Image: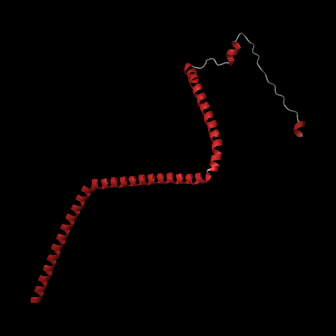
Amino acid sequence: MAERDRPQPHQVQVHSQQRYEGGVGMKNILPQKGPSTSQVLAVITLLPVGGSLLALAGLTLVGSLIGLAVTTPLFIIFSPVLVPAAILVGLAVTAFLTSGAFGLTGLSSLSWVVNSLRQVTGSMPDQLEHAKRRMGDAAVHVGQKTKETGQMIQQKAQEGKESGRT
C-alpha cells in the first residue's frame, strides 16, 4: 500500500521522426549489402535436398506406422512361437559375438607372447655373453680358492709332519 501512495517518477521517451524521402529512409533499415552469390547458390542447392530428405523421413514414418498396425495382430497371434524364437536368435547372436570376442582376445594374447619372445631373443645374445663372463669369473674364483685351500692343507700337513718329528 505504501508503494501506491508514493509518487512514481515519470519516464519520457523521445522518438526521432524520419520522413520517407524516395527510399532513402528504407536504405537505413535494410542491410547495405545483399547475400553473396555462394550463399544464394547454397540455398538454391540445399533447399530441394533438405525438402526431399524431409519428405522421405515422413514417408518412412507413415510406412512404419502402417506396418506396425498390420503386424501387431500377427505378433499377438503368433507370440507363443515368436517369443521363444526371438530368445533363440538373441542367444545365438550373443554366442556369436562372444566367440568373436574370445577369438580376438586369444589372438591378441598370442601376439603379445610372440612380441615378448621376440624382445627376449633379441636381447638374448647380450644376456648369454654376460652369463658366460660371469661363469668364467666364477670358475676362475673357484679355481683360485681351490688352489689356496690346497696350499693351506699342504701347509698344515707340513706343520703336522714337523710337529710329529719333534
Q: Which of 141 and 77 is in front in this view?
A: 77
- Work out which residue is located at the far left of the displayed protein and give it: 165
- The residue at 64%/42% (across/down) is 70
- The residue at 47%/52% (across/down) is 96
State the colouring used for the structure image: secondary structure
Question: Residue 3, how many percent across, how many down?
Answer: 87, 38
Q: Kindly indicate the quadrant of the structure image that contains residue 66.
A: top right
Question: Residue 83, how many percent across, how many down?
Answer: 59, 53
Vertical placement of residue 27 versus 147, above or below: above
- Work out which residue is located at the far top of the displayed protein and give it: 22
Can the viewer see residue 166 in this picture? no
Question: Residue 64, how many percent across, how many down?
Answer: 62, 39
Vertical placement of residue 24 versus 105, above or below: above
- The residue at 26%/56% (across/down) is 124
Quarter of the picture holding the N terminus: top right
Q: Which of 131 and 85 is in front in this view?
A: 85
Give the total number of marks visible in the rendering.
Answer: 0
- The residue at 59%/31% (across/down) is 53
Q: Nearer the viewer, residue 87 or 6?
A: 87
Vertical placement of residue 32 versus 79, above or below: above
Is 41 on the left or on the right of 128, as rendered? right
Question: Residue 28, how many percent across, how many down?
Answer: 68, 17
Is 77 on the left or on the right of 95, as rendered? right
Q: Kindly indicate the quadrant of the structure image that contains residue 142.
A: bottom left
Quarter of the picture holding the C terminus: bottom left
Can the viewer see residue 118 in this picture? yes
Vertical placement of residue 64 versus 48, above or below: below
